[in-house]
Amino acid sequence: MNPDPTTQDHKRIAVRCTGVTKHFGEGEARTEVLRGVEFTADLGKLTFIVGPSGCGKTTLISLIAGLLSPSAGTVEVFGRATTDLSPGEQTLFRRHNLGFVFQQYNLLAALNAVQNAAVPLLTAGIPRREALRRAGEVLDRLGLGKRLDAYPRELSGGQQQRVALARALIHEPRLIICDEPTAALDHTTGEAVMSLLASTAVHPDRAVVVVTHDTRVFHFADRIAHMDDGRIVSWEAREPGADSLHPVPSPPSTP
Amino acid sequence: MNWIGLLMLRNDRAKFGAMIVAVALAVFLMQNQAAILSSILLMTASQIRDVEDANLWVTEPDVECFDQAKPVRDIALHQVRGTPGVAWAMPLLKIDTIARTRGGKLSTVSVLGVEDSSLVGLPRRMRLGSAEAIRERDTVLIDPGGFSLLFPGEPPSLGKTLRIHNRTLKVVGISDASPPFTGLPLLHTSRTTAAQLNVGEERSTTFILARSVAGADPIEVCRRIAGRTRLRARTTDGFARDAMWFYGSQGVPMLFMVTIAIGLVVGAAITGQTFLMFVKENARPIAMLKVVGTTHAQLGWMMAAQAGLILFLGSCMGSGLAAVVCEAVRQQPFLRGLYLPSWVALSTCLSLAVVTGGAVFLSFRQVQRLEPASVFR
């Protein structure tokens, strides 16, 4: 069974979640957060996961990123079951294949813009001078070429999110995961950040997964997975060349 | 990555400063106390080590330190001289008595009488005057601390006089003898003069100073001397060790050790606790680093670099402060013996590094347990 009716080409699937469940706690404290999620994200597409607070969006991307382990089901990223990787292998897998944009930016206050953007390269052992040079180039592309030495406290929310975007892009990952990237921004700035994300992050060999409940930016999505109560309840997809999304019937998810 | 860690540390100036100050104060306290302790112990053997001509000391069997002045039989000197492996042997008379200055100042003094012709046992270095001047009767050399005690406020000078047992002694030199453990003024004179001050005592030898012949094993020579004289013969190093051990086992060092231990524990506790707070307050950035692929090994090295910088700066400051205080105190004539041995400075820094390292390791365990997914919350 194809879990995602909007997926056209199985070779282009970057992320595949099959029958994923996740619970926290045991006994009376047990909370079912994900209840048999079937999800895919394609290369070259901007896939949104939307839904109300507490529906399990963040838990799902934590599982995709290998930051949490599913209680049941499998998570494959670029054909590799991340659940089979050891914690150390998952760390290295994230380092090379994933980029992250967070709601609260999560920039290091001690580092300036260019240093923050260079963190993934420094983590990978790239020499500092080279890492900072490349970070400067990426920030320049994102319109922050004149604020390289600015510290997070000296930047606006939109500028900080652009630095975070540079940090997510700098090591050219194949999957970028964004958690509520516009939630802390006003409409205009959120629109600008999403526009930048769509124009710089989306790439034929890269998938972008965005978790959001900001309806103002839904029009940037190529595909939208609607979540509720720990399940994907419906999908929407954009036809090639079309301006708007249309609903796609969702198959029953695994209980 | 270490560079990022150091920038994070520098950014939190309050905690960075607090940790450096904690390390600095702990190092200062430990080094100061350890310096006093080691200096006191070294001072218990300072008069033994000051005698550089001889390498063997012969005493009564139950003598444990230099200050236990117990006369030996005069015949023993000839027995020592006749022992195979002994190049020469000379008597040294030590007496403790009371001296009075012309100004009426009274003080107990230690008088060391060296053999009149060879002058074996005199301090090698002089601050003022000549050691040879004591060949003249009723003359003495005095150590700097003794001079300032007996002639307070007066600049070091020759020609002062002292009265001991109705004899007037003229100060003909100020020696550079090491400060004695007792803190008493130290007078060097000829054995003949010293014997005349030793009222009521027939024996005029307290120690026999000897030199083993070149090529002979000093320890074997000591064995031979002991066998022949039934006295106790030790090398200079052995006698000095015995003296330090004797005083070291009297309980006073334990008080210093307690203070040193308190410095170690308090310094490490403050540093470790502050470091733990630093790590907890940086949980989110650290979780972010874990999310973007930073391994535990990289984080461990990063924290080691942070702790290393704190310890280095704190140790430098603490050691510098301890050295300055030590140097200032040394200006006092009686405290000339106080100094900060490099091994004391190094070992206190290392011990603090080890204990603080343990505390930092506990912080690292927190980092290991830190859930990276918390960055999404």
Image (cartoon, rainbow, N blue to C red):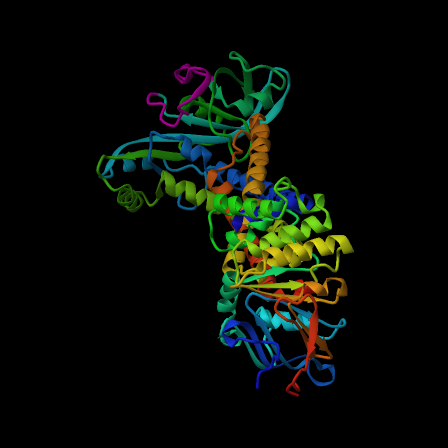
Q: Is residue A110 left or right of residue B339?
A: right
A221 lies above or below A1: above
Please state the horizontal and vertical placement of residue A22, each as a whole percent of the image: 65, 79
Farthest residue to the top: give it. Answer: B159
Q: Is residue B50 left or right of residue A101?
A: left
Please state the horizontal and vertical placement of residue A129, each as a whole percent of the image: 49, 43
Is residue B95 visible in the rendered structure shown here? yes
Is residue B64 visible in the rendered structure shown here? no
A49 lies above or below A191: below
B275 lies above or below A145: below
Q: Report the label total.
A: 0
Q: Relative to the observer, which residue lies in front, A64 or A125? A: A64
Q: Relative to the observer, which residue lies in front, A135 or B194? A: A135
Q: Relative to the observer, which residue lies in front, A196 or A151? A: A196
Which image quarter is the C terminus of chain B in? bottom right
Please state the horizontal and vertical placement of residue B126, each as a whole percent of the image: 44, 19
Would you say residue B119 sits in the magenta stretch?
yes
Q: Residue B88: which quarter of the image?
A: top left
Residue ID at (59%, 47%) = A141
Residue ID at (59%, 52%) = A166
Would you say residue B302 sits in the magenta stretch?
no
Please state the horizontal and vertical placement of residue B331, each as a whole percent of the image: 57, 25
Bounds of the magenta segment: B117-139
